[in-house]
Image: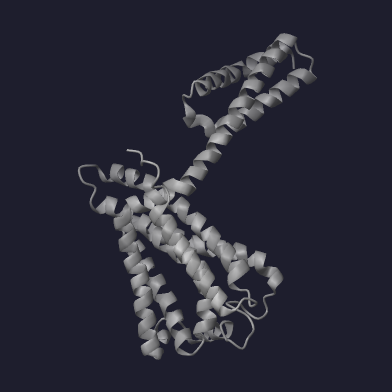
Amino acid sequence: MKQSLFENHHKAEWAQFSLMLERLERNKDTSRVASFPKDYRRLCQHLALAQERGYSSFLVDSLQQQVLRGHQQLYRHRSRLGANVLAFILADFPRLVREQWRFVLAASLIFFGSLSGFALLVYLFPDLVYNLIPAQQVSDLQSMYDPNAGHLGRSAERAASEDWVMFGFYIMHNIGIAFQTFASGLLFGLGSVFFLFFNGLMIGAVAGHLTQIGYGQTFWSFVIGHGAFELSGIALAGAAGLQLGWALIAPGRLPRAEALRIAARKSVRLICGVMLFLLIAAFIEAYWSSMTGPAPLTKYLVGAALWCLVAMYLLLAGRTRHAPE
């Protein structure tokens, strides 16, 4: 391709990239940062073509200058993104949880209330478990947590070398539950209430049954560690869903669509933190909870420490910085 045709074909694209560079250098128009890496790579390809085809030094030097400026902006915004992610984890997420304490409290009461209440009922009235869980599934659970089986919370056929496979499975399973609980909040919050209550009943039924038949130590020593992040994550996902539902039920003076859009901003950020919790929970469940080496007392101490860590993180992290208006 002749240089004149090459320039005519791409000059509008180069002008647009140059304009973006100028705005980024003045800290303006950062909304297009997400597309910047793709545009930058395309410019690099144009420079390589110009050099390969022996185009004029004026064109090559011009493209090279834009590539150098783009390189500076690319890594500048990557660094900023990393700093923003770190700030979200260390301060913004726990501060958001505290800001939405009403929804968090409501979701926690529904979830943990149904869990503990049904666990007690099943413990006192053992046959209740079969009203919620099929007999075959109950039998499978018993074999998984049998103290004499020599394994914790997994089938006997699963080898320790498969922990990394289970890590991926736990991530997908937990995220599926969390997203279901969150997204169903669009049904005026009723979906979130249902899934919080239903998951609480299911977990409570399992806990009550296994404790009642004498498998409590095997069960509790397995779940106490990852439960700190997993159960908290489910409750927070429900809180995010309730927030969406409340925006539809009581939008105030705003149109429902606008109220939902505003609520969704915070709910989606809350879900991002939930994903982090569930990732940590999956890692602990795959690589620590299923270990048979540590004594149950060690598992209980580590689990208690993790519950305290989650509580302190959500209650105290981010208090040193003033929340934005």
Can residue 233 be seen by looking at this rendering? Answer: no
Q: Quadrant of the C terminus?
A: top left
- Image color mode: one colour
- Residue at screen point 63% across, 86% down: 149
- Residue at screen point 50% across, 65% down: 306
- Residue at screen point 61% across, 73% down: 290
Looking at the picture, tell me which residue is in the foreground, 248 or 6: 248
Please tell me in which quadrant of the rendered image residue 53 appears.
top right
Can residue 98 be seen by looking at this rendering? Answer: yes
Measured as percent of width and height from the top left, residue 207 is found at: 45, 80
In this rendering, the answer to whether 91 lies above or below 187 is: above
In this rendering, the answer to whether 152 lies above or below 46 is: below
Measured as percent of width and height from the top left, residue 312 is found at: 42, 58
In this rendering, the answer to whether 46 lies above or below 255 is: above
Measured as percent of width and height from the top left, residue 159 is found at: 70, 74
Looking at the picture, tell me which residue is in the foreground, 53 or 276: 276
Measured as percent of width and height from the top left, residue 278 is found at: 51, 60
Please tell me in which quadrant of the rendered image residue 17 appears.
top right
Q: Quadrant of the N terminus?
A: top right
* Total numbered badges shown on the rendered structure: 0
Looking at the picture, tell me which residue is in the foreground, 151 or 304: 304
Looking at the picture, tell me which residue is in the foreground, 162 or 78: 78
- Residue at screen point 76% across, 13% down: 55
